[in-house]
Amino acid sequence: MDIATIVGILLAFGALFGMAQMEHVEMAGLFLPAPMLLVFVATIGCGVASTTMKDALAAFKTVPKAFTGKVTPPQTVIDDVVGLAETARANGLLALEQEADKHDDPFMKKALQNIADGTDGDELRILLEDEIESNAAPMRSASAFFMGLGGFAPTVGIIGTVVSLTHVLANLGKPDELGPLIASAFVATLWGLLTANFLWLPFGGKLRKLAQLEADRQTLLMEGLLAVQAGSQPRLLGERLTAMVPPAARGAGGKDGKAAKASADDQQLAA
């Protein structure tokens, strides 16, 4: 579980409430039902109107992933692929069919099954590339939906402010009430900007990042398994896959970096 979204949103709202306390803002004046209703409901309505109902519902179902999305470290993928390369080198490609049953990842199971069945390497690459694109599509669609909400919310907030200001203008004959009315009018703009930048845009950005990380993981896995099919040496395969990973992400997760490399070297020497 990656807690970045939780931490980030808590920091954002914490800074807002901290500022309100320092400025001695009356918090009850910020939580007015009417402007909040307009901003939340109208923003979501505009978002739904801009896509299909199926995609909108699917987007909201991905919200928990923005908080609990699991990111598999590249080193874990590399360790798994090197282990499969050692198995294929010792027992042949048919042994990968049994390895497929040990993994829960549908993408890996499909790749291993096709390798064991003798699928041509070029055809397998096309199949897996199409699979990667298909797997990433729903998350990217959800990301685009929330980014769209982030665009609608500020404008909806301004609409709410304009509506409230018409009420203010209708009461110019009551000077004692103008201050509170004007303050209330700008609450809609506040919530439009707040929801856009504290909720919708972070959700969209996080889902887009998760989709990219998963696509990168599957691409790394694809390249590794295709190399296994081609008979690559396990140690060299591990080094090649490591070179495909950005330096900052190397050695995270899986076995301890040096221990994993030493283990692979020892196994290669023993072979």
Image (cartoon, grey):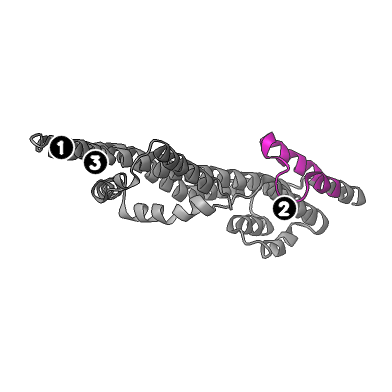
- Residue highlighted by disc 1: 176
Single out the mark in the foreground, 3 or 1. Answer: 1
Q: Is residue 6 left or right of residue 187?
A: right
Question: What is the crowding at mark 1: few (fewer than 14 residues within 10 Å), some, or many (at least 20)?
Answer: few
Q: Closer to the camera: disc 3 or disc 2?
A: 3
Which residue type carries mark 2? Asp
Question: Alpha-carbon distance for marks 3 and 1?
Answer: 14 Å
Find numbered disc 1 in the image and state the secondary structure of the residue it sits on.
helix
**Vertically, is 180 above or below 87?**
above
Could you give the CA–CA distance between mark 2 and mark 1, rounded to whole angstroms? 72 Å
- Mark 3 lies on residue: 184
- Secondary structure mostly seen in magenta is helix
Q: Which residue is found at the position 51% from the left and 46% from the top?
A: 5
Q: How many numbered dots are placed on residues in this image?
A: 3
Q: Secondary structure at mark 3?
A: helix
Stretch in magenta: 235-263
Q: Is 261 colored magenta in this rendering?
A: yes
Q: Nearer the viewer, mark 2 or mark 1?
A: 1
Q: Foreground: 174 or 78? A: 174
Q: Residues within 10 Å of mark 3 (few under 14, many from 20)?
A: many
- Asked whether, in this view, residue 144 is left or right of residue 97, the answer is left
**Could you tell me which residue is drawn at 32 percent across and 38 percent down?**
190
State which tag comes first along the sequence, 3 or 1: 1
